[in-house]
Amino acid sequence: MASAQNHVQYSSKIGIIGAGISGIAAAKQLRHYDPLVFEATNSIGGVWKHCSFNSTKLQTPRCDFEFSDYPWPERDDASFPSHVELLDYLHGYAVHFDVLKYIKFNSKVVEIRHLGDRDTARVSDTAGEYGSLLKGHPVWEVAVETNQAIQWYGFELLVMCIGKFGDIPRMPAFPANKGEEIFGGKVLHSMDYSKLDKEAATELLEGKKVAIIGYRKSAIDLAVECAEANQDHPFEEDYASCQMAILPENFFSEAEKGNILFKRASKWWFWSGGIEFEDKSKLEADVVLLATGYDGKKKLQSILPKPFSSLLADSSGIMPLYRGTIHPLIPNMAFVGYIETVSNLQIAEIRCKWLARLADQKFKLPAVEKMLEQTTKEVEIMKQTTRFFKRHCISTFSINHRDEICEEMGWKSWRKNNWISEAFMPYSSQDYQEAKY
């Protein structure tokens, strides 16, 4: 790639990478800085646009998955919105707050460079202060590919919103001579399946014996989609965890018909006619769909420069993000959408509010060492709570997390109007409206 020297077009104090839920939330909260948002595709929505199936729906009611200042139309509708409805909601939000003008579509970030010598100092010194987010001069240079041309931009702050899902699929490893090369059928990751149009998906599934490997939302959505395409052709799903998503419509009815079968198996591999499990049992299959997730860490590491790419995760494989947003060892960079909670949209919004106030210097970050101690303490607590601690999806942690964010911003952490509501009423995004502090 050509040198960035003499090619940098400095356009904004703040650059945002990705225009999914986190990206548009960040753009809205930071819009007084006229941020520049780079989106690799031609639309907003992230995984809801590019990794969804016909059967994909939101797993929570509308009122539990909305921005604090932009309620759903008919928000009390008890049905779960489809991914199409969710995309319409996100587009309405972006239009309402005039966020689309900040987004450069079909603009893929291909390289990031750090300016100055702070990288070496930050890696070796954990006792100092993190410093302000906006330095008054570019700290990061970003190479963006648009229409096969490379343009460099300089930013004081970079907000990473490319998410953990999509782009780089997590593929299972197999023993020698037991991989997909010996299988006579078709193997497809859920990411690739989501890109098929309705006609191509029907051609792939109809009249076929389908095996789905996975156990989370993508696998369950695929289960219904495949069963409905094959009323007389059951398939099996490798169901490896009790960590079950909210089930889509028709799941139980299709299971009762025998179109959805289950097998718990932690180890499996291919044979010529399908898949074989560790108990030596075999399953015939024409198509194997891999709902095995994505490698979000590799996705980030592919564009972050050294030494920062090696600092993304700690020894337990978790990103040590203070308030779920700031990596204490990476200067002038924020991450939104990498630490999950029970409601990713709500937490993305409040973290972006926190980030905007931090950029405005309404408060200061603790010392680097203190932030690292805080993130380590949180991980240890979650390790004692669940073996799924890496996902951070623990309701009590989420409530406490939001309380701490509010207090650091100078807001009241008790957001209800009276103690009765505090004691007995659940919190929603509307409780975190700015007027309520």
Image (cartoon, grey):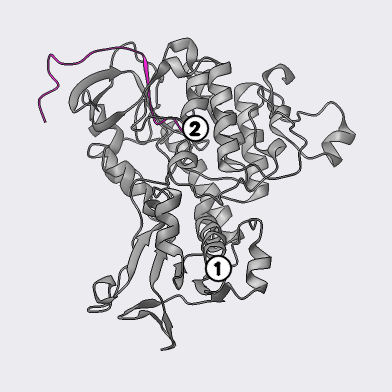
Q: Main secondary structure of the magenta part?
A: loop
Q: Residue at x 30, y 69 (%)?
A: 173
Q: Amino acid at mark 1?
A: Ser
**Residue 6, magenta (yes or no):** yes
* Closest to the observer, 359 or 250: 250
Q: Which residues are magenta?
A: 1-21
Q: How busy is the neighbourhood of tag 1: few (under 14 within 10 Å), some, or many (20 plus)?
A: few
**Dot 1: element:** loop
Q: Are marks 1 and 2 in contact (CB under 8 Å)?
A: no
Marked residue nearer the N-terminal end (1 or 2): 2
Q: CA distance from mark 1 to mark 2?
A: 28 Å
Q: Amino acid at mark 2?
A: Ser
Residue 241 is marked as 1
- Compared to residue 258, the image places residue 206 above or below, namely above
The answer to whether residue 317 of the structure is visible from this angle is no
Residue 22 is marked as 2
Q: How busy is the neighbourhood of tag 2: few (under 14 within 10 Å), some, or many (20 plus)?
A: many
Residue 130 is marked as none
**Residue 15, magenta (yes or no):** yes
- Compared to residue 399, the image places residue 418 above or below, namely above
| Residue 69 figure quarter | top right
Furthest residue toward left: 2
Give x and y (percent) for residue 403.
67, 34
Give x and y (percent) for residue 328.
40, 35
Give x and y (percent) for residue 161.
42, 33
**Dot 2: element:** helix
The answer to whether residue 399 of the structure is visible from this angle is yes
